Every structure is written in structure tokens, then in C-alpha cells.
Amino acid sequence: MATAIIIGSGLGGIATALRLRHKGYQVTIFEQNDYAGGKLHSIEKDGYRFDLGPSLFTLPHLVDQLHDLFPDHCNSFSYIKKSVGCHYFWEDGTSFKAYSDQADFVSHASDTFAESKAVINNYLNNSKSRYNLTKSLFLEKSLHKWSTYFSINTIQAIINAPFLGLFNTLHKENEVFENPKLTQLFNRYATYNGSSPYQTPGIMSMIPHLEMGIGTYYPQNGMHRISQSLYELAVKVGIEFRFRESVTKINYKDNKATGIKTPINNYKADIIVSNMDIYPTYKKLLTDYPAPQKTLDQERSSSALIFYWGINHKFPNLDLHNILFSENYPEEFDHIFNKKSLFNDPTVYINITSKETKTDAPAGCENWFVMINAPGDYGQDWEAMIVEARKNIIAKINNCLHTDISNYISTEHVLDPRGIEKNTSSYRGALYGAASNDKFAAFLRHPNFNKGLKNLYHVGGSVHPGGGIPLCLLSAQITADLIPDVS
Ligand code: FAD
């Protein structure tokens, strides 16, 4: 039987494993940790459960597609559509519920921000058109195969290039709104791929369509069910997981990958797929092979500093997703991407899954995932930065929610960029691989195949088409499509 080895059991790794198993390969996943899921993992502490990484779930059909590959196995994954995407707060007392339904969003936004309904509607319709025009080129196919460029969809995207906002920054595009708060709200979508709205191209204005057009979802029993349900399916269909077995080398001969090495053994396979971040894949597993330095030198996406707080109080005015905005957004991004430090007035994201899954917190309590965007790890004094950031986050929460949150924190766990890198090998702790602060970023990402080594493929957030759950799942689809069927 044809064999495949996958290095890493992140979402991209498990999804590729399932697709290759479906093609008839015998698949083994080597994972350095003792759990599957990579960044998509959860912890329990003092009666609270926390999703450690992703909290926002869009395009759920991409998970369904994987379960649907194996109809004989009962699909244990389910989710609900949220009617409110996010609840936004500013220090001057403004608050805004972003409804998923476009008409409701427009009407409420127009009232809250005294903005013309036509302008908001036009923006969202544009977001939809841009998404529909470009998804097939940028998200669903390899950008590194000539065949991609000879399709109707691609030709349409190229013809419409002048209207895609490629030559503006996202912030410039978002200045169509008179009210700077609405501009800030739409600027925030740059963070969905770890970029700055003041640098990322205007094409990123297609991201709101995912939320306001297609919708945000919540997996029953939490985000970790995405990776866990796929892991359970993988075990059922005969994919072997070798946990706590870190890959130390990719073996190759005559420009052809032949297998891998771990501290325990050398293993051969017909196909090798690395779900490890592309930077350490070259720097640690292919040390004697020339690395594509230009690709590896691309600016990394932002990282995050997260406080997981058990809160022994209920906040009925909060939703599943909540944002408490900085008063000076340009300064915040200047700190993250240029100064590589944390701004003293951060935008604070609070995710509370116990709003949906009551058992995630003890009765009368809530599980708060409190995150600020952060620079990657460049050897800063994180201990001092964390102490300072904790104070600033508490001040922001108190100012926006009129409370004294420090009275209610009953338990705490902290994750910073160093921890993200340690847990998942993500270079500098980047959440989404390379940043999209450059209009050519999409073309500069590493392809899903290796140009020099036959039979070696790459999947996950640090390669094409990029980071985030939906893109990692699409990455697995593109990678699997490049791998030949078992004859
Ligand atoms: P990863 O999750 O990076 O996993 C790689 C795996 O490979 C790990 O299990 C690692 O242990 C293993 N590995 C690495 N090297 C080796 C080796 N040598 N040998 C064996 N195993 C190895 N996305 C969203 O869509 N929505 C969100 O709200 C969101 N929020 C996020 C918040 C945080 C705090 C973080 C960290 C990420 C967030 N993301 C979000 C991004 C999303 O989590 C990632 O893009 C996605 O999960 C990455 O999947 P991946 O396939 O690249 O693999």
C-alpha cells in the first residue's frame, strides 16, 4: 500500500491525513506533543475549560466536508450559527452589536454611528463581490501551478484587479465611513490574518463578508471539538498517530524525499507532508538543503498575549465575542509591527464560551479568554511586558464595562508568543505564519509542494493560502489535490 507520513497534527496535518486516507494511502502522523490539534487545543483549570487558541469559527462546511469523506462513520461534529458576530465597546460608552444578518447590521450600524445606510450596504456588497471574485484564485488553488491561471475565475479576477483594492491599504478603503469608529471596526479585520490595517491591502475588505455574509458559528461544546472530532474520525479510519515523537530530519536522496528521522527510528514513506511551520521545516529538518531565504524572511504575522481567567461573576451585557477598542489604533499597530512592543492602550478581545456551553465554567461564573494582539518573540523582556499589559488590560475592561474586574479573577493561566512557539514550533509565535502587510504576500507564501524535493509537500498556516482555520483546511485540500491518487 502507498504510504504517507505527516509531520504534525495541527488542523492542516489532520485534514491532509484524512484526505490522503480517503485516496487510499496508509497514513502515519508524527506529533511532538501528547495531543492532537496544535494551536487548536484546550485546557481545564479549577473547574473552568478554555479553548487555548482559535475562538472564531467561519466556513464550517470545510469541516463537514472532511467528515463527509467517510459517510460510514457517524459525524460527531455540530455547530450553531450566531446571530450576533461580535459585541464592540468604546471607552466613551458607545457599544455596538454586530448582527450577522446584513439588513440588521446595516440598520443598527446606521443608528449607532450616524452613518448612511447606503454607504454601509455598498461596503458590504463590495466585500461580497471581492470575496466571490478572488476566493477561487487565492484560496482554493495552488498559486504556483500554471493551470491555476487558465481558468475563467482567474481571468475574471485579473480583469477586475483595479476594483479589488490591491493598491490601497485597508484603512484607506475603510475611510469611506464618516465615523472613525466604523472605520476602526472594519480595520479590525486585518487582524484576522495577523496583519496591520495600515499596511495590508484593501482586498482584505473581503473578510467581513465571511462574518456578515456567510456567518460566524460556534461548535457545540467548544472550538476544540473541531480538532478533536477530526482526530477521532482519523483514528476510526485507521490513521496512526505517534505522539511524543518529534521529527528531527526529513531524509532525501537524489532530490526526492524518502522518509523522516525521529529520536526513535528512521521511517520511509512514498509521500511526506510537513505541517510544521515552514521556517523550522527548513531550518531544523532540512539543515543541509538550500532554504528559499526570501520566502522565509517574510515579515511574520502578529502573535498574541492571552490571559485565561476564571471569573466568579456574570456579565449579562457580554456575548461570546467581545471587543474593547483602543483609543489610538494606529499607535497600537505601530507598537506591534514596528516597535515590537505592547501599546499601553490595547484593544482587548474577550471570548466567553460559557455563554454557549454552560459547563465551561462553574455555576455563577464565566470563562474569559482575554487576548491582545502582540508582536512576535524577538527576545523582548516578556515577564515585564506581561505585568504591564495585565494592568493595561484591566484598566481597559474597567473603563469600558464600568466594573473592577480584578475583584472577580479567581484563576489565571497565561500564554505569550514564547509559549505559542514552544507548543507548536510556530516561528516567533506567529498566529498565522507570514503577515499580509505586503500586496504581494499571497504570492510570496511557500507553495504546498516543495520545488526541489519531489514527494515533499507543505500544509498549514505558514504556507499557501495562509493561516486561520478555514485557510488551513483549504491548504489541506490544495495539498491533497496535488498528491497523486494511489494507483
Ligand atoms: P498548527 O496548529 O501550527 O500545528 C502544528 C503541529 O505540528 C503542532 O501540533 C506541533 O506540535 C507539530 N509539530 C511541529 N513540529 C513538529 C515536529 N518536528 N515533529 C512533530 N510534530 C511537530 N484561527 C481562526 O480561524 N480563528 C481564530 O479565532 C484564531 N485565533 C487564534 C488565536 C490564537 C491564540 C492562536 C495561537 C491561533 C489562532 N488562530 C485562529 C489561528 C489558527 O489556530 C491556526 O491558523 C491553525 O490552527 C494552524 O493550524 P496548522 O495546520 O498550521 O498547525
Image (cartoon, helix red, strand yellow):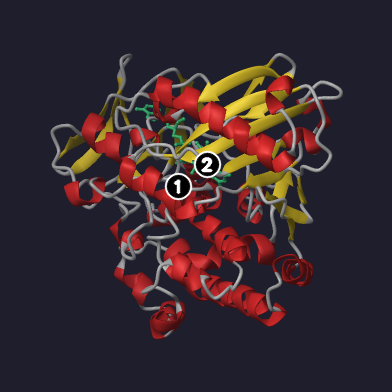
Hey, which quadrant is residue 105 in on the image? bottom right
Q: Is residue 305 above or below residue 156?
A: above
Residue found 40% across the figure and 19% down from its top: 245
The answer to which of 243 and 423 lies nearer the viewer is 423
Residue found 42% across the figure and 20% down from its top: 383
The response on whether ligand 1 sits within 8 Å of label 1 is: no
The answer to which of 258 and 262 lies nearer the viewer is 262
Q: Is residue 225 visible?
A: no
Are the residues tagged 1 and 2 within 8 Å (C-beta)?
Answer: yes
| 442 with respect to 227 (left or right) | left
Q: Position of residue 475 (x, y in %)?
A: 45, 52
State the CA–CA distance, disc 1 to disc 2.
6 Å
Q: Helix, strand or loop at disc 2?
A: loop
Residue found 69% across the figure and 45% down from its top: 321
Q: Which residue is mark 2?
A: 346
Residue found 77% across the figure and 66% down from its top: 108
Q: Which residue is mark 1?
A: 332
Hey, which quadrant is residue 99 in on the image? bottom right
The answer to which of 324 and 92 lies nearer the viewer is 92
Q: Amino acid at mark 2?
A: Pro
Q: Position of residue 455 (x, y in %)?
A: 29, 45
| Number of numbered labels in the structure image | 2
